[in-house]
Amino acid sequence: QVQLVESGGGLVQAGGSLRLSCAASRRTFVGWFRQAPGKEREFVAALSWGGHTTYYADSVKGRFTISRDDAKTTVYLQLDSLQPEDTAAYYCAAKASSSNYYSPSQYDYWGQGTQVIVSS
């Protein structure tokens, strides 16, 4: 079992920044996904705790950064240069390995989500 608790969402103007946090109950492979109203859940970024490897969706590469704090078993998602199209509920999720990291159906555990709203 892995418990995940997200925080850090909010309302920001276009061009602004937010940092999301995902507190995990243990070290594991962690991914961030987002879901806008009426759209499917999509992969944003992921991090392999053991191998220090990071993965990004093309749409966020260069703007978002995933990182971790080993002492706190917390994974962060830094959101920079935010645009209105980044508006969504953001979720962190956990799985045992990096295989098919981009597919939400491959993740076993999910947090409750945190809302990000970017105004133009």
Image (tube, grey):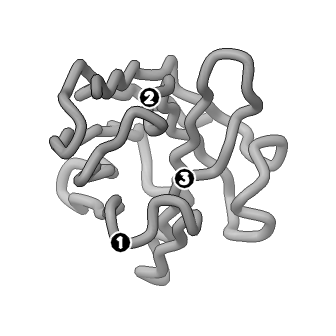
Q: Which amino acid does label 3 sit on?
A: Val
Q: Distance from label 1 to label 3 (Cα)? A: 12 Å
- Residue depicted at 60% across the width and 46% down the height: 94
Q: In this view, does 4 lie to the left or right of 103?
A: left
- Residue depicted at 48% across the width and 22% down the height: 113
Quadrant in the picture for residue 18: top left
Q: Where is residue 27 in the image (x, y as percent from the top left)?
A: 44, 56
- Residue depicted at 68% across the width and 69% down the height: 98
The front one of 13 and 114 is: 13
Q: Which amino acid does label 2 sit on?
A: Thr
Q: Which amino acid does label 1 sit on?
A: Gly
Q: Distance from label 1 to label 2 (Cα)? A: 17 Å
Q: What residue did someone put label 1 on?
A: 62
Q: Is residue 103 left or right of residue 93?
A: right
Q: Look at the numbered disc 3 and give the secondary structure of its residue.
A: strand
Q: Look at the numbered disc 1 and give the secondary structure of its residue.
A: loop
Q: What residue did someone put label 3 on?
A: 44
Residue 45 visible at all: yes
Q: Position of residue 44 (x, y in %)?
A: 54, 53
Earlier sequence position, callout 3 versus callout 2: 3
